Image (cartoon, helix red, strand yellow):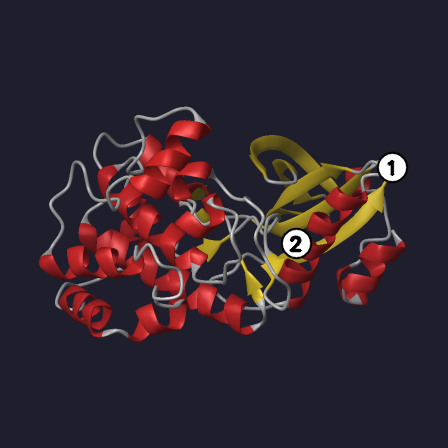
Amino acid sequence: DAKVRKVLPRSKILELNPRDIYVGMERVGSGANGAVISASKRSSKKAQVAIKRCYIEDHDTHHHTYILRELRIMGCMSHPNLIQLTEACMWGDYLWMAMELMTCSVFGLLFNVSVGLPESYAVRIAHECLEGLVYLHARNYMHRDVKCENILLSRSGQVKLADFGLATPLNKTNSARLGTAKWMAPEVVSETPYTENVDVWSLAITIIEMMDRVPPLYYLDGNREIFAEILCGQQPNFNFTMPSPAMAELISWMLHPDGKRRPGAKCVLTVRFLCNLIGLLNLFSYSRDIYIYNI
């Protein structure tokens, strides 16, 4: 409890039993550090939130580190493309983290369609993810788990990166094999020191996932086979979609196997290919809610 109070602004500390404050609790998913439930405030049932409830073991200090890091990112950083913490508290054996409630994840959207998203949708979602990553990296953190499951959409079409349970500071040497296997960059798999541009690799895999409906190594189950393919196989590519030449070039660049030569998020965001793709999209009458046509 003392550590939670140390990393969060006082305005975001909840002093009461969350069960007295929130009603209509229903499990809607899970994150790296705990179950996620939806609820609404007893005082205003229209004010819905998502609550991540994490069981805290007294002596699991390693887990505490990840939890506190996630709290610090969501509670102290503010960006339209990063999920925000509204309040949190320790109550009993659980840490309760209330966040803004989104409509669904991109993964949930793909689950309800029979084909992947059109390239225009994937570009727009990726563009907003890059905005969030540039902000996160500028504040000295990498995400380490970018994938469709961790990209949330609102009914108005807002795109937000979520689940910072595996995020880590950039000012220390990072070489741990953490993340989700099929989205890991080669240097993460090989457990050699890596930088924040591992998020760019993961985002490129995520773009393929959005357009193909599955990630490139969807047909592999065991981590040993997945890691071998990432390290020794061909560069990941689209299996079921024919991307535009600009998209194919962009993905190839973002998936450079040498982490030192792979672009950073800011570089990708301002690069000519992406600007050209966004320019093409602007020829259409774009609405922010085009992503959610199947919600």
Residue type for callout 2: Glu
User: Dot 1, crowdedness within 10 Å: few (<14), some or many (≥20)?
Assistant: few
39 and 1: which one is in front? 1
Residue at the spot 18% in from the left edge and 68% down from the top edge = 282
213 and 287: which one is in front? 213
SS for callout 1: loop
Residue at the spot 44% in from the left edge and 29% down from the top edge = 224
Mark found first going from the N terminus, 2 or 1? 2
Whole-number angstrom distance, CA of label 2 to CA of label 1: 20 Å
Residue at the spot 22% in from the left edge and 44% down from the top edge = 237
SS for callout 2: helix
Quadrant holding the C terminus: top left
Residue 76 % position (x, y): 67, 67
- Would you say 37 lies left or right of 278 here? right
* Residue identifier under label 2: 70
Residue 42 % position (x, y): 72, 43
Is there any visible trace of residue 160 in the rendered image? yes
* Residue identifier under label 1: 92
Residue type for callout 1: Gly
The image quadrant that residue 183 belongs to is: top left
